[in-house]
Image (spheres, rainbow, N blue to C red):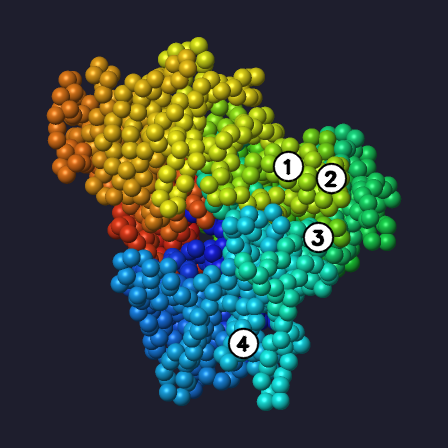
């Protein structure tokens, strides 16, 4: 079995983010690392975040930093696992990252003594330090050679054995020798002391390392003990801008430290409702500096942002002294993994979980808020006196945009619950109050601007400008079977009657002719409306009527009934002149004229589709007017034609390496879109591609997207064909079926689409381009764990649980007290919980001042659990039943089960644990299996009984009318009784903990948390469970899926996906064993099972896979394995059906590895084999980088494969279309 791996949705979580001026000009950009890909983002004028460039690096990005060599543009450096440092800059012209330098310093992976966990750059860009978690630190000196190219020295060592490093940063000391600061802990004594005394007394130190540029040597300059809660260092501006030194962020404190300067300490304000045992830690920071001032924004682990300022003054010796450190409450936003303050007044917050956001500064925190200062620090017997504050709504920031993030995907199912053309992907995402159920549909999101009812059912719509230079459209023209309606676009859209259009007849086409005149084609003639109001009419000869029309700004071709074509051209005076007639062999089905090329008088090509299943290209040149240049036969009569010009672009940005070119697109009656290239000189057709779009014949229309020509295809659902980052993409729009469309531009909506469907006129815009899925979000209460489908009513049953939080009732009563204390009174928002649960928040204005989504839940003691079971109707998004579990129980597993005893019908089994603790070691009071009955047609639950068990039931599954439960290391079979579940049989021979169970016929496939899969068989006559096969490789299972009778797919916590299969002969032997004696008496080796499964597929995804499912994402497509990951990405593994395809793609992958090595310098093969050698999987993400290569490299690879670049692109497009 060979598989093709393709990422469908890039990772949406962000590991680290930096901001800087990478492109040049005034604007600032943000570079974000999403695990194994690197994105360059920029907020546009409207404050929406746009992706300028995104690249897959095939390596693990661990940290990013930017620096500027003195007097040069901003570069970026980043550290990639395992053991490489890469310096790169962004090429604006080529729109790509360019690697300047790469240095390898570790070859054994991300281990604790291999540097790279921390990265710090000297603020003047002269040196960089990389540190490991333990022992090793390396310093590189950055310089220039005579040609002003960047050079980098060999590494200087600053190692110290038996030390753990917590954070490092570069100290801003102007142009003195570079200094780096580190928080370190020496554990050498703790290692020797077996009593544990030394370990409890171990002390953290702040150490300054100095790089002597003259001697090229690093020395430890200064060290002193600091708080043991210290976890983060922040550089303080130095030189002429500030006092230099560092801020040490410790538990509950921020301390300013510098060599030869007394400590300045202030306490971090804490929330009034925080339990006393919990400290406050800073998790992310951002610095803003201007000419005259600087401040820091520090965010705590609860999401509160504090503004930190330093009061400093110079003494007689010109030394700067810090006199006061102030910490002031600024605002509260969800917890971030990185914050970036942009010079343009934006704050980019890369959230830890849930959507990322872009905020705009309304103020910089000069109002009166709770403030802690070093001057007012009070010391008491218990320690320093805390300062309390109450979170409030946003005051200094306002959110203007957000970027969707699925991180982490906890569970996923692909189902078609809405009876749409393609299935939907239901994912459980997020954590705590920011968790949600997201329904993903393949396609682009639409935002609807307006919908208005029309006086009848229209059959077409157009928009026209009055002058070619106008920015916005002037009229919307709607054609009905009996007349035409003209709407004028201004402040509002209203009907007009003085436009010159004939309104008593249906229209066939309306467009702008020349520079400033309008044309209306109706069945009986052409109406030419001049700018001064004069109207010229051309009538059809005899009884004939016009059936089809094609036009551009200077040429018009009409087709009369019977198949006669008449060609008109605009002359110098602006008159429409008849040039040529031509008889076609039969009626014309459709026609189109290519747009007029820049600087030309006319376009050369006319495309005509006939009912005899052909498309002809005719010439419009005066020399060979109406001569047939080429003929293309198609599989079904064409319904609609569109000649689309693709502009010339550098580096083959339109996905192939030709200059400007014309594509002929045809929508055929069998629902297929046919696409081919028209040769600009000869008119010959080549490189044809086709794709099935839907059950109706696609109608094709031009649209403008981001200032470029794009194509709308309206089939049984709308599609958009456009160019994004060098690739031609054809993506469905998540919208209802449309009949006719035209592009629309007004001052409220610069790039929109106006369309008709039924008796309504709709105006909409297309949201973020380049996205594969758009999502519907339903908020949840706690972190979701798993969900199942209740099959009869198509409801979802979700279990959610959180540690260290309060139940909804406790939160509500605390909130009431708090609001009463603040004097808001009862009418504050008591019914808020219900409203949030149903996902029907009221208007933005009336929003609850302290929404949980924004502020997180109040924290409880860590041994307290909250959990609930929810029944959700996915069609309406309403929760029909929400059961909170009582007395510290938390739900971990769920399944629906039909017992032999039919009296109850389908029941719901939920496995819970009471009082579960993970530290100091895992313990629990007891486990339970609850059995619920569905009542009120499945809308609600009723508890039948609960059965106590001795461990946590992490896996439940129905099996032959009974319930299988994995409780710790025991696999047990239960039947239902009146008061509790009844044990029927069990097997205790599993190594660790069972975390997944799948069944098929009489086989049971058990996943162990640490030891991969075990294949079991249940013998009913003996009532025994036997393990007959297991895996020889220890795997830490995170997800599993049953593929077929002998095959299982699984993923482990190191980011690998693998398939195991039972050898065919072993499988047959076990099935053909009538007495069962063979399984029973066979002895395994070393406590293992007698047979071993074989690994048939192995692939390193580079991200922990949390769920796997076999599904098909397109109607009629092949089944593939879909996976979701912790970082919020979705991918697919498609099985190849022909040996020829396997050969082609494996050779393409081989050439891509050689000719286009990954940006980060990691060997692609080594990356995909990070833990186990890659086996029988071809990396589609690497193959799909083929269109981004330079044209000559594309040709070189294509020649090696005996193909043309066009054929390779077609192959890539075809295989992608098989998946999505």
Tag 2, which secondary structure?
A: loop
For residue 296, say whether it is visible: yes
Kindly report the distance in space between the C-alpha atoms of the residues bearing marks 2 and 1. 12 Å
3D distance between C-alphas at marks 1 and 3 = 45 Å
Q: CA distance from mark 4 to mark 3?
A: 59 Å
- Contact? badges 4 and 1 (CB < 8 Å): no
Reading the chain from its start, which is encountered first: label 2 or label 1?
Answer: 1
Q: Earlier in the sequence, mark 4 or mark 3?
A: 4
Q: Is 772 on the left or on the right of 1190, as rendered?
A: right
Badge 1 element:
helix
Q: Position of residue 100 (x, y in %)?
A: 42, 72
The spot of residue 915 in percent (x, y) is: 43, 35
- Quarter that holds the N terminus: top left
Q: Nearer the viewer, residue 753 or 713?
A: 753
> Which circle, 3 or 2, is nearer the viewer?
2
Q: Earlier in the sequence, mark 3 or mark 2?
A: 3
- Helix or strand or loop: what does disc 3 sit on? loop
Position of 680 compared to 314: left or right? left
Distance of label 4 from label 1 (alpha carbons): 46 Å
- Which residue is the site of mark 2? 828
Q: Which residue is mark 3?
A: 750
Question: Seen from this angle, which residue lies furthest front?
Answer: 381
> Is residue 412 visible to the viewer in this orientation of the structure?
no
Which residue sits at x=14%, y=34%?
A: 1084
* Residue where numbered disc 1 is placed: 812
Cα gap from disc 3 to disc 2, whole angstroms: 41 Å
Q: x, y (%) of residue 1120?
A: 38, 37
């Amino acid at each position: 079995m060979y598989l093709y791996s393709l990422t469908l949705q890039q990772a949406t979580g962000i590991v680290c983010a930096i901001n800087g001026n990478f492109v040049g000009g005034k604007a600032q950009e943000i570079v974000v690392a999403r695990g194994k890909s690197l994105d360059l983002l920029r907020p546009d004028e409207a404050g929406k975040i746009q992706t300028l460039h995104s690249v897959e690096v095939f390596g693990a990005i661990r940290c990013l930093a930017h620096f500027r060599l003195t007097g040069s543009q901003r570069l970026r450096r980043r550290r990639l696992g395992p053991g490489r440092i890469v310096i790169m800059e962004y090429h604006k012209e080529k729109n790509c990252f360019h690697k300047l330098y790469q240095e390898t310093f570790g070859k054994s992976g991300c281990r604790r003594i291999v540097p790279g966990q921390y990265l710090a750059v000297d603020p003047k860009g002269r040196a960089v330090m990389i540190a490991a978690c333990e022992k090793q630190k390396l310093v590189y000196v950055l310089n220039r050679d005579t040609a002003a190219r960047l050079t980098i020295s060999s590494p200087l060592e600053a190692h110290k054995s038996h030390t753990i490093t917590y954070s490092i940063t570069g100290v801003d000391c102007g142009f003195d020798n570079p200094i780096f600061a580190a928080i370190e802990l020496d554990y050498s004594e703790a290692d020797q002391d077996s009593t544990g005394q030394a370990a409890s007394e171990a002390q953290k130190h702040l150490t300054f390392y100095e790089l002597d540029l003259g001697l090229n040597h690093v020395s430890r300059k200064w060290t002193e003990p600091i708080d043991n809660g210290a976890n983060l260092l922040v550089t303080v501006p130095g030189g002429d801008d500030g006092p230099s030194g560092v801020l040490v962020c410790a538990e509950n404190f921020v301390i300013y430290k510098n060599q030869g300067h007394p400590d300045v300490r202030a306490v971090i304000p804490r929330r009034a409702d925080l339990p006393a045992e919990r400290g406050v830690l800073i998790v992310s920071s951002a610095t803003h500096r201007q000419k005259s001032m600087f401040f820091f924004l520090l965010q705590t682990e609860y999401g509160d942002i504090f503004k930190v300022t330093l009061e400093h003054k110079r003494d007689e010796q010109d030394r700067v002294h810090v006199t006061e450190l102030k910490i002031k409450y600024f605002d509260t936003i969800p917890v971030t993994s990185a914050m970036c303050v942009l010079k343009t007044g934006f704050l980019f917050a890369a959230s830890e979980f849930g959507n990322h956001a872009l905020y705009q500064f309304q103020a910089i925190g000069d109002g009166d808020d709770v403030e802690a200062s070093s001057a007012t620090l009070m010391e008491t017997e218990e320690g320093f006196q805390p300062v309390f504050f109450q979170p409030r709504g946003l005051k200094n920031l306002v959110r203007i945009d957000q970027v969707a993030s699925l991180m982490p995907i906890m569970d996923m199912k692909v189902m078609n619950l809405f009876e749409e053309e393609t299935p939907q992907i239901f994912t459980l995402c997020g954590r705590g109050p920011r968790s949600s159920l997201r329904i993903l549909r393949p396609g682009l999101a639409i935002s609807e601007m307006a919908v208005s009812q029309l006086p009848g059912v229209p059959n077409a719509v157009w928009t026209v400008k009055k002058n070619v230079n106008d920015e916005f459209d002037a009229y919307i023209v709607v054609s009905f079977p009996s007349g035409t309606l003209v709407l004028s676009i201004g402040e509002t859209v209203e009907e007009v009657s003085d436009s010159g259009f004939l309104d008593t007849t249906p229209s066939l086409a309306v467009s702008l002719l020349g520079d400033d005149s309008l044309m209306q084609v109706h069945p009986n003639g052409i109406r030419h409306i001049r700018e001064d109001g004069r109207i010229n009419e051309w009538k059809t000869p005899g009884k004939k009527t016009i059936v089809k029309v094609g036009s551009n700004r200077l040429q018009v071709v009409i087709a009369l009934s019977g198949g006669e074509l008449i060609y008109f051209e605009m002359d110098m005076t602006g008159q429409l002149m008849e040039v040529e007639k031509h008889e076609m062999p039969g009626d014309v089905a459709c026609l189109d004229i290519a747009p007029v090329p820049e600087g030309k008088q006319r376009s050369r090509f006319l495309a005509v589709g006939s009912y005899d299943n052909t498309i002809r290209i005719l010439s419009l040149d005066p020399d060979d007017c109406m001569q047939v240049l080429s003929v293309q036969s198609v599989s079904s009569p064409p319904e609609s034609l569109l000649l689309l010009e693709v502009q010339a672009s550098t580096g083959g940005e339109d996905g192939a390496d030709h200059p400007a070119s014309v594509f002929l697109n045809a929508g055929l009656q069998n629902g297929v879109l046919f696409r081919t290239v028209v040769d600009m000189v000869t008119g010959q057709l080549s490189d044809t591609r086709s794709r099935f779009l839907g059950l109706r014949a696609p109608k094709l229309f031009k649209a403008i997207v981001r200032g470029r020509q794009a194509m709308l295809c309206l089939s049984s659902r709308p599609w958009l064909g456009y160019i994004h980052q060098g690739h031609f993409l054809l993506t469905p729009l998540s919208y209802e079926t449309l009949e006719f469309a035209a592009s629309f531009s007004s001052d409220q909506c610069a790039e929109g689409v106006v369309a008709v469907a039924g008796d309504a006129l709709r105006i909409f815009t297309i949201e973020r381009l380049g996205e594969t899925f758009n999502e519907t979000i339903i908020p949840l209460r706690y972190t979701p764990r798993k969900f199942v489908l209740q099959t009869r009513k198509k409801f979802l049953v979700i279990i959610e649980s959180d540690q260290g939080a309060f139940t909804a009732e406790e939160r509500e009563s605390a909130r009431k007290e708090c609001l009463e204390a603040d004097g808001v009174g009862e009418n504050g928002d008591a019914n808020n919980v219900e409203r949030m649960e149903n996902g029907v928040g009221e208007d933005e204005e009336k929003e609850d001042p302290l929404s949980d989504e924004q502020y997180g839940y109040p924290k409880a003691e860590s041994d307290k659990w909250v959990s609930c079971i929810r029944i959700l109707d996915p069609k309406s998004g309403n929760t029909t039943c929400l059961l909170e579990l009582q007395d510290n129980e938390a739900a971990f597993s769920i399944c629906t089960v039909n017992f032999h005893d039919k009296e109850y019908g389908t029941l719901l089994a939920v496995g819970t644990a009471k009082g579960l603790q993970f530290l100091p070691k895992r313990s629990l009071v007891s486990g339970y299996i609850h059995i619920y009955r569905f009542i009120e047609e499945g809308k609600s639950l009723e508890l039948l009984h609960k059965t106590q068990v001795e461990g946590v039931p992490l896996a439940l599954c129905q099996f032959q009318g009974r319930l299988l439960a994995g409780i710790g290391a025991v696999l047990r079979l239960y039947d239902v009784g009146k008061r509790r579940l009844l044990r029927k049989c069990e097997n205790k021979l599993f190594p660790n903990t069972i975390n997944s169970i799948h069944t098929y016929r009489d086989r049971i496939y058990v996943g162990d948390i640490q030891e991969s899969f075990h294949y079991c068989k249940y013998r009913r006559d003996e009532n025994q469970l036997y393990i007959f096969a297991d895996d020889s490789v220890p795997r830490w299972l995170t997800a599993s899926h049953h593929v077929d009778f002998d095959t299982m797919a699984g993923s482990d916590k190191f980011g690998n996906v693998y398939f195991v299969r039972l050898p065919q002969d072993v499988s047959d032997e076990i099935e053909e064993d009538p007495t069962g004696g063979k399984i029973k008496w066979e002895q395994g080796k070393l406590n293992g099972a007698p047979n071993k499964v074989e690994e048939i597929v192995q692939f390193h995804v580079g991200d922990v896979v949390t769920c796997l499912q076999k599904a098909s994402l397109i109607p009629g497509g092949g089944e593939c394995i879909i996976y979701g990951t912790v970082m919020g990405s979705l991918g697919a593994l498609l099985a190849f059906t022909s040996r020829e395809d396997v050969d082609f793609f494996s050779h393409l992958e081989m050439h891509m590895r050689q000719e286009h090595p990954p940006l980060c310098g990691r060997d692609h093969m080594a990356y995909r084999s990070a833990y186990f050698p890659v086996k029988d999987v071809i990396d589609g993400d690497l193959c799909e980088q083929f269109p981004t290569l330079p044209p000559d490299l594309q040709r070189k690879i294509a020649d090696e494969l005996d193909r043309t670049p066009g054929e390779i692109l077609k192959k890539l497009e075809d295989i992608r279309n098989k998946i999505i």
